[in-house]
Amino acid sequence: MPQGDHGKAVWAAGRRLPASRVRQAVPAGPVTRALYRFVEHTIRHEPAGGVTCELFCTAHDCGEGSGSQSEQGTAQDWALRHTGLNPGHDLFRRVFTDHARVTRAE
Ligand SMILES: [Zn+2]
């Protein structure tokens, strides 16, 4: 399960700034002036959003899947039944999803 993934980044106008540009941007032209304020944000795993598990059968032309499940065991039970009913369908692609929250540092 993904956990503990977090990091810091500084974004301006929708673009991630390289570390060298952080806290350097106050351009002022000769006639007009513009002030840019950079705001630090942090992104980290949000447990309250839950984690989902979904399994997909990889057998040629099958295309069946467990559907998104909040319990990993439910998705795995589907795979066990699927293999039992379809010998040879024994390899599954597993997809886990979690949620991440971005918070403003100020
Ligand atoms: Zn299958």
Image (cartoon, rainbow, N blue to C red):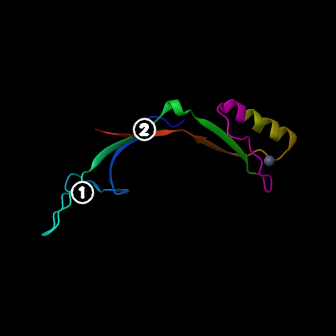
Q: Is residue 27 above or below residue 90?
A: below
Q: Is residue 5 visible?
A: no
Please tell me which residue is depicted at 12% across the width and 69% down the height of the picture.
Answer: 30
Looking at the image, the residue that sits furthest to the bottom is: 30
Q: Hey, what amino acid is under mark 2?
A: Arg
Q: Which residue is mark 1?
A: 21
Q: Hey, what amino acid is under mark 1?
A: Arg
**How far across and how far down the image is residue 45, in percent?**
46, 36
Is 68 contained in the magenta span?
yes
Q: Secondary structure at mark 2?
A: strand
Q: Secondary structure at mark 1?
A: helix
**How far across and how far down the image is residue 20, in percent?**
23, 56
Separation (CA) of disc 2 from disc 1: 23 Å
In front here: 12 or 58? 12
User: Which quadrant holds the C terminus?
Assistant: top left
Please tell me which residue is depicted at 51% across the width and 30% down the height of the picture.
Answer: 48
In front here: 25 or 52? 25
In front here: 79 or 52? 52
Please tell me which residue is depicted at 71% across the width and 41% down the height of the picture.
Answer: 67
Q: Is residue 11 visible?
A: yes
Task: Name which quarter of the figure residue 72 lies in.
Answer: top right
User: Which quadrant holds the N terminus?
Assistant: top right
Label 1, residues with CA under 10 Å away: few <14, some 14-19, many ≥20:
few
**How far across and how far down the image is residue 65, in percent?**
74, 45
Q: What is the chief secondary structure element of the magenta stretch?
A: loop
Specify start and end residues of the magenta stretch as a single range.
59-75
**How far across and how far down the image is residue 61, in percent?**
80, 56
Q: Which residue is mark 2?
A: 44
Looking at the image, the residue that sits furthest to the left is: 30
Please tell me which residue is depicted at 26% across the width and 50% down the height of the picture.
Answer: 38
Does residue 100 appear left or right of residue 22 in this picture?
Answer: right
